[in-house]
Image (cartoon, rainbow, N blue to C red):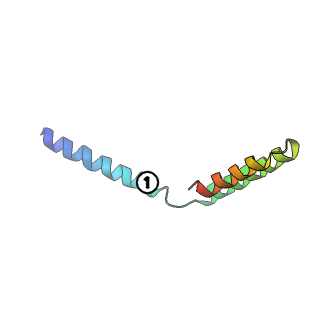
Amino acid sequence: MKSRLIVVLRTSSLLGAIVFLGGCASKGPGERAGESIDRGVQNVRDVVNPAGPAEKVGRAVDRTVDP
């Protein structure tokens, strides 16, 4: 009885992990829209309080590296 429970728990954990990671495969339209809004807000902040060149390069690297 106990070993059957362990098998069921392991199987459900594995399937849960597969479903969870499968949902992260591509960006949906909501996520793309959110990123666009974030960039717009950052551009407005840069107009009000200009960022230095190093900070701009750092943001570009973050956007490139971020999956």
Residue at 65% x, 54% y: name it.
61
Residue furthest right as drawn: 48
Most extreme residue toward the left is 1
> Which residue is under mark 1?
21
Q: Is residue 29 left or right of residue 11?
A: right
Which residue is pictured at 85% across the width and 41% down the height? 49
In which quarter of the view is residue 27 placed? bottom right
Relative to 3, 57 lies left or right: right
User: Can residue 49 be seen at all in this image of the molecule?
Assistant: yes
Of residues 58 and 38, the one drawn nearer to the viewer in this rendering: 58
Q: Residue at x 72, y 53 (%)?
A: 57
- Evaluate whether residue 30 shows in this view: no
Which residue lies at the image location 43% right of the left edge and 51% below the top edge? Answer: 20
Task: Give whichever of 51, 12 is nearer the camera.
Answer: 51
Amino acid beneath label 1? Leu
Q: Quadrant of the N terminus?
A: top left
Residue 36 % position (x, y): 72, 55
Q: Label 1: few (<14), some or many (≥20) within 10 Å?
A: few
